[in-house]
Image (spheres, rainbow, N blue to C red):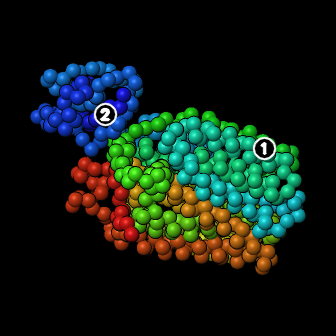
Amino acid sequence: MMMEVIWTRSLNLSFIQVIPPNQKSIDTFCSSLEQFPRVCCQKHLCLRCLLAQHSQAVCLADSSPAPGLQSVSPRPAMAEPVFSVQPDGGWGWMVVLAGFLNNCLLVGVTRSFGVFFIHFTQYFQESSSRVSWISSIAMAMQQFASPVGSVFGMHYGARPVVMVGGVLSSLGMLTASFGQSLLHMYLSIGLLTGFGWALVFAPTMATIARYFKRRRALATGLAFTGVGVASFFFSPLFQLLIDEYGWRGALQILSAMMLNLCVCAALLRPITLREDLLVASGGRPNDGRKGAECWGKVTSAFDLTLFLHRGFMVYTFAVTLMTTGYFVPYVHLVAHGKNLGLSDYEAAFLLSVTAISDIVARLFSGWVADLKLIRAIHMLFLWSVLTGFSLLLIPLGQTYASLMGLGLFYGFCSGALPPLFFSTLPDIVGIGRILNATGLFLMCLSIGGLLGPPLSGFLEDLTGSYDVSFLTAGGFILAGALVLLLLPSFFVCATTFSGRRTGDPASGQASGDRPALETDRS
């Protein structure tokens, strides 16, 4: 039976107030509750639910039941708790642990894949630009298919979707170990593993954002430290595995490691927020036309109205430019070191050293952002400028020591970016739309991830050196930083709502509940 469920929030939620359906209308019932203190009935949070075992409308209310209404305790098992604000801890730290391990096995592997790059070039006897497409397709597929992961996560929950993604990622690496051509590698690592990563990354990062508000940047930074930890250990580990078992055996071991994503998925406990009910209650009119109805379903499922959101589009374009240059050092820094005469282990250790400062930067960036000394978008601008300049300096390093120093500097600057990328997004679109926004955001970022490394490889084939590649990558990141200046309210020190500062404790409103940046639509 289709029933009206009214979620009400108060200081103490321990009783369920029940009224028989059709005896009072919802409006009359809400009006009758206004005479009782500490009962907050919000009519706009109504949503329709199918209660197979119940034939009554359920209303969560104050611990003191209203006269004339039946009180029941405990709450029915089918009713999930609704949080008015993110818990900022609790099981959220286990979700952060899952994000940490997922980033180890996704982005950490991607950034350490440059160790395989040299062996693929030698085995397949192909140019640098063509071999670069393997990792580029994987990164682009992970990001481009992220809206699919978001939609599946909305309908089935993050946990089963991430498990399926872990299985697909493992199968992709396993089939790649039998590859005889670059096309085989494109399809296995690029498409199959990349699609599996897409089902893992977006639901995981969105779940972290839903558990945290005040500590969101720190929680995101902790999850992303998995990238630095994995990069530190995976580069020499992959080199060791290749020396012992060859690149095919190393990919088979990596395939087994990917199955740990299924274990991480078990930690992603779902959470229901008040803003979810606001989003769910917003229906779309049906004009009776089948085509319009189908398009409305697609628009609703993927939340395509975000493409009309000015702040979201400007922010996405800026970060897309940054990602075009962001992954270039992690794909070609090892090859650049080899061109300068470094040994295999010295070149691989460059990525490990870069990962050390990357870990520190992710924690430092998240911690400073949560202090609210300056707005997160301003911090993102400063770190992106420093990252661009650090890439411009890499061609100056001609010795092992100088490359180590420049790698440390680049790792510290670039490591501060990812926590800010994802912790700023809920401030722009609101926490209720974060899952679909993360998917569409990553889909657009796939353009940069797809074009950056092949462009770098093409410039190396053209010039015989990676110097121009690093200069071009730095230019893309600086261009993205300039685009951030076009964001609505970028030059405003603090955005206000109803005359109160966002995030001010006196306002009683959390900055994560509503967009902190202006939400103009063009």
Vertical position of residue 133 compared to residue 209: above or below: below
Amino acid type at circle 2 is Val
In the depicted view, which residue is nearer to us: 85 or 356? 85
In the depicted view, which residue is nearer to us: 272 or 233? 272
Residue 238 placed where, x, y %? Answer: 77, 50
Q: CA distance from mark 1 to mark 2?
A: 48 Å
Q: Nearer the viewer, mark 1 or mark 2?
A: 2
Residue matched to label 1: 174
Residue matched to label 2: 5
Question: Which residue lies at the image location 37% right of the left edge and 66% below the top edge?
Answer: 521
Side of 396 relative to 100 (left or right) = right
Within 10 Å of the Cα at label 1, are there few (<14), some (14-19), or many (20+) other Cα atoms?
many
In the depicted view, which residue is nearer to us: 419 or 251? 251
Quarter of the figure with residue 344: bottom right
Residue 404: in sight, yes or no? no
Residue 497 placed where, x, y %? Answer: 26, 59
Question: Which residue lies at the image location 74% right of the left edge and 46% below the top edge?
Answer: 172
Numbered badge on residue 245: none
Side of 113 relative to 419 (left or right) = right
Quarter of the figure with residue 163: top right
Element at badge 2? strand
Within 10 Å of the Cα at label 2, are there few (<14), some (14-19), or many (20+) other Cα atoms?
many
The extreme bottom residue here reads 463
Question: Which residue lies at the image location 53% right of the left edge and 65% below the top edge?
Answer: 319
Q: Quadrant of the C terminus?
A: bottom left
Residue 410 placed where, x, y %? Answer: 61, 65
Question: Which residue lies at the image location 49% right of the left edge and 75% below the top edge?
Answer: 482
Residue 311 placed where, x, y %? Answer: 41, 65
Vertical position of residue 241 compared to residue 4: above or below: below
